[in-house]
Amino acid sequence: MARGASAKTPAAAGAALAAAAGKAGEAAKLGKKTPIDLGDTASLKRALDDCVVQVVTDGGYEEDHFVSNVKIALGTVTCLLALVAQFYPKKWLAQWWVLLACVLAYGACTLALNVFITRVEGEVFLFTRPRKGGKALQASSKLPRFSPEYMLQLETHPKAPNSKLASLERSIASYFDVDGFLVEAPFRADVLRTLRAFESQQKKAQ
């Protein structure tokens, strides 16, 4: 009997693995998302921000990639400067001025990138182009570490001194289940409601 039981074990294990693989493949086909660690604040915020982008773009707004393009351009220039300084085809003493110029330019580009991110981007994760009959908007959010409160703000872009904003503040417990899956329906409804409030304020201001 012991031999028979041991003979069945590999077959049972193989069947279990095949079943697990089949379920995983079926889940992938259905497009099920992977759960998020509920202690990972950055990942939770990123998932909510991505959903906001989908709701806003589905609402007729076109995303403006100017800020992202500037960041990519500055980052590319700094990388090229580092490559020139490292692989310039002359000995060090003969190209000290090239190295010095690259170091100074690298520092200037890095400083410019940090200033641009701080002054222009800040906590904004979405810039849009102006919509017909309306203005462009920008979306910013906060989810402090160890805090369950997610805060979303929608305001005009560029930001005006007396511009009104529409905001949403709610606990992430309303949007994530105990397994770490984002329950999109209630969150999308809240974001859409905030977007409509923003548009209503813009119409009153005109």
Image (spheres, rainbow, N blue to C red):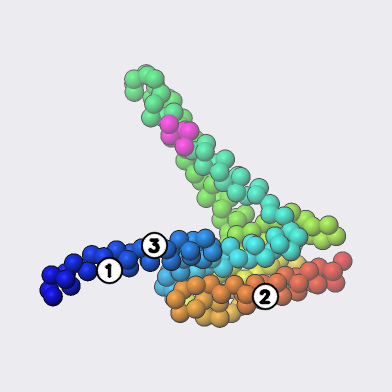
Task: Report the magenta residues as a range.
Answer: 79-83
Q: Earlier in the sequence, mark 3 or mark 2?
A: 3
Q: Nearer the viewer, residue 99 or 196?
A: 196
The residue under the point 66% across, 47% down is: 66
The residue type indicated by label 2 comes to Ala
Tags 1 and 3 touching, CB below 8 Å: no
**Residue at 52% over, 36% down:** 77
Q: SS class of the residue under badge 3? A: helix
| Label disc, if present, on residue 197 of the rendered structure | none
Residue 97 percent across, percent down from the top left: 42, 25
* Residue type (three-letter) at the residue carrying disc 1: Ala
SS under mark 1: helix
Q: Regarding mark 2 in the picture, which secondary structure is present there?
A: helix
Q: In front: 53, or 83?
A: 53
CA distance separating discs 2 and 1:
46 Å
Task: State the residue position of label 2.
Answer: 189
Q: Quadrant of the C terminus?
A: bottom right
* 199 sits to left or right of 150: right
- For the residues carrying marks 3 and 2, which lies nearer the camera in this image? 3
**Residue 111 in magenta stretch:** no
Q: Position of residue 81 (x, y in %)?
A: 47, 33
- Which one is in front, 90 or 43? 43
Expressed as whole percent of the image width and height from the top left, the position of residue 53 reads 64, 62
Residue 122 sits in quarter = bottom right
- Amino acid residing under circle 3: Ala
Q: Which residue is mark 1?
A: 12
Label 1, residues with CA under 10 Å away: few <14, some 14-19, many ≥20: few
Where is residue 127, by image quadrant? bottom right
